[in-house]
Image: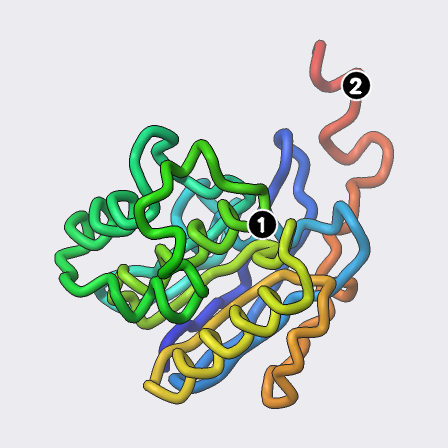
Amino acid sequence: MMLSVHDLAVSRGGIAILERVGFVLDPGEALVLRGPNGIGKTTLLRSIAGLQPPVAGRAELPPEGAAYAGHADGLKATLSVAENLTFWARIYGQGDIAPALHAMDLEGLAERPAQNLSAGQKRRLGLARLLVTGRRLWLLDEPTVSLDTASVALFAAAIRAHLASGGAALMATHIDLGLEEARILDLTPFRATLPAPGQGGGFDEAFA
């Protein structure tokens, strides 16, 4: 078992948005979170990653934790592509960055400062960080933002290789990555029920 989520409830701005979320993710599996905008996909991923506490329930991750890729690319602007990846590889106790450069087609940009990259190139570099973490569990929030079709295909191939090596991926994405093996979890049934008037959370009680 790579990830086990039990009766997880999460909130945004102090208001519960998802509740009783539960699923299991095994090695070699990918799970795609779906649902309308604002339902709480990002909040759920952040809670599982340990970036914000859940309202209730728990998530059991591998002992080493997970690699999280959110909306920010996490780059140091003045460092080159290679220097950025080397920095993150050392943070995670890893060594060779060559496979990550190759997987995300960054070899020709290795010496270019991150601040001189296009939006798509920055995104590819941000995602290449996943490949130097050594983490078996990837948590991905709209990872294909700013990527063209060819780059989406590169990243899909990186995910597939990660799964083939025994890794797992939980992601929120509106783009079809072509991962036929990925399972889909619709979060709509887990939308939190708002309290009825007079049963807590109302304006009057806030000032009682």
The single residue placed furthest to the top in the displayed view is 207
Q: Which is nearer the eye, 18 or 202?
A: 18
Amino acid found under the numbered disc labelled 2: Phe
Amino acid found under the numbered disc labelled 1: Gly
Is residue 37 shown left or right of residue 161? Answer: right
Is residue 194 shown left or right of residue 55? Answer: right
Assign the N terminus to one quadrant of the image: bottom left
Hey, which quadrant is residue 182 in on the image? bottom right
Residues at marks 1 and 2, CA–CA distance in whole angstroms: 45 Å
Vertical order, 123 against 52 (above or below): below
Instruction: Report the label total.
Output: 2
- Tag shown at residue 203: 2
- Tag shown at residue 13: none
Which color mode does the image show?
rainbow
Residue 45 position in % (x across, y down): 53, 54
On the image, numbered disc 1 is attached to which residue?
120
- Identify which residue is drawn at 52% across, 69% down: 155
Assign the C terminus to one quadrant of the image: top right
- Identify which residue is drawn at 13% across, 57% down: 93
Vertical order, 1 against 80 (above or below): below
Mark nearer the N terminus (1 vs 2): 1
Q: Which is nearer the eye, 114 or 178?
A: 114
Vertical order, 161 against 129 (above or below): below
Residue 90 position in % (x across, y down): 15, 51
Residue 96 position in % (x across, y down): 18, 65
Closer to the camera: disc 1 or disc 2?
A: 1
Helix, strand or loop at mark 1: helix
Quick one: label 2, few (<14), some, or many (20+) residues within 10 Å? few
- Identify which residue is drawn at 50% across, 78% down: 157
